[in-house]
Amino acid sequence: MKKLVKNWCLSSIIIFMFLIFVFIIFMTIDIFSDMELLLFSIGILISSISFFLVGFFINNKLVSKISRVNDIVKDSIPKDVLNRSLYSNLNADNEIEILCCNVENVIFEVKASEKIKNDFISSMSHELRTPLTAIKGWAETIKVGELIDFSTVRKGLNIIAKEATRLSGIVDDLLDFSVMSNGRLVLNMENIDITAEVADAVYIFREKASVEGKKLIYNDPKLPLFVYGDQARLKQVFVNIIDNALKYTKEGGSVNVNISENNDKVKIEITDNGCGIDKSEIPSITQKFYKANKSKKGFGIGLSVVKEIVSSHGGELKILSEKNIGTSVIIILDLIKILEDKKS
């Protein structure tokens, strides 16, 4: 039974007992005749029953309305958001307290979403302005023609191509995020060697790491480990995480990529000794548009996309970090036994 209805029933019982007590007193002092006492007792009984039934009906309807509003409010709160409440001793049976708590969470999320949206617009404007400015500037310079030599033209074209590729990457990230936010992610599932996908992702960044004076170390398990998944999407996960690890690691630092097998699970762990993340921010960094480090480029959607891809594969994403120490991103996926399947 709901809290409000319980309280009403208890109140009705107390009032009824009080009326009985009054009735007993009247009987004791003998100020009424027998007929008057009978009528008085019948009146008390009818009044008490009517009072209880009407109140019970009204409270029950009220609780139903509150519960309905509470469900609507609760559905508007993102599932990955921690329960934020001013109530340290929230009563789980009290509908009013629960409703207040959920309304508070919604208000908090609306304010947070507004801030995130403004940060995203600002970040997107900056991210788009930089390559567009470079492309426009070099295009106008090359357009002059007679004022520059061939080597300068070639340099300008290289910059234009590089910035156009960067713009293409930004658009791809936004499209991926849009697809996943709308629940339209389609996976091309097949049996794949996950070690090969990790190795390819490491290879992509090996030259970049070397140029930036950072070490990218891959501990190859030397044997294939098969999972059932989307090859392109899983590689996207590893590329995104390694890219982040290198981005937040200073010159002279290192990024380690390890793969291990345990209990029909494969664990891919990417660890850096970069700037790290404050523990209070770890629960938020996989939320869309959230950026722990505002000074770095990006929209804050990379890890939210990673989380969605890993979840869609039935996997688990863990992030362990300590400020100024480093970060470990762990991906756990289910292994499949190709050889055993063939024999069976």
Image (cartoon, grey):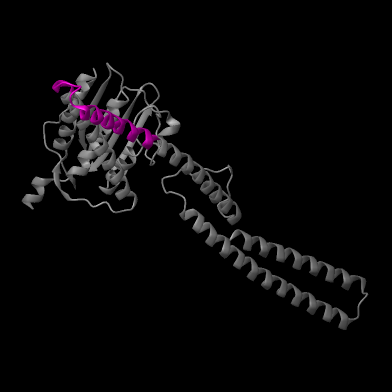
Q: Can the viewer see residue 221 in this picture?
A: yes
Q: Nearer the viewer, residue 343 or 115?
A: 115
Q: Nearer the viewer, residue 38 or 130?
A: 130
| Residue 307 screen position, x and y as percent | 31, 42
Q: Nearer the viewer, residue 137 or 87?
A: 137
Q: Identify the residue at horizontal 75%, vertical 68% (top origin).
A: 16
Q: Identify the residue at horizontal 41%, vertical 29% (top origin).
A: 294
Q: Identify the residue at horizontal 27%, vertical 48% (top origin).
A: 314
Write down the quadrant of residue 26 in the picture. Answer: bottom right
Q: Is residue 230 left or right of residue 28?
A: left
Q: Is residue 126 magenta?
A: yes
| Residue 48 screen position, x and y as percent | 74, 72
Q: Residue furthest front?
A: 146
With respect to residue 63, does 247 lie above or below? above
| Residue 289 screen position, x and y as percent | 39, 39
With respect to residue 148, does 313 lie above or below? below
| Residue 46 screen position, x and y as percent | 75, 77
Q: Quadrant of the N terminus?
A: bottom right
With respect to residue 143, does 184 lie above or below? below
Q: What secondary structure prevails in the magenta region?
A: helix
Magenta span covers which residues? Answer: 123-152
Q: Can the viewer see residue 1 in this picture?
A: no
Q: Is residue 92 left or right of residue 122?
A: right
Q: Is residue 59 left or right of residue 271?
A: right
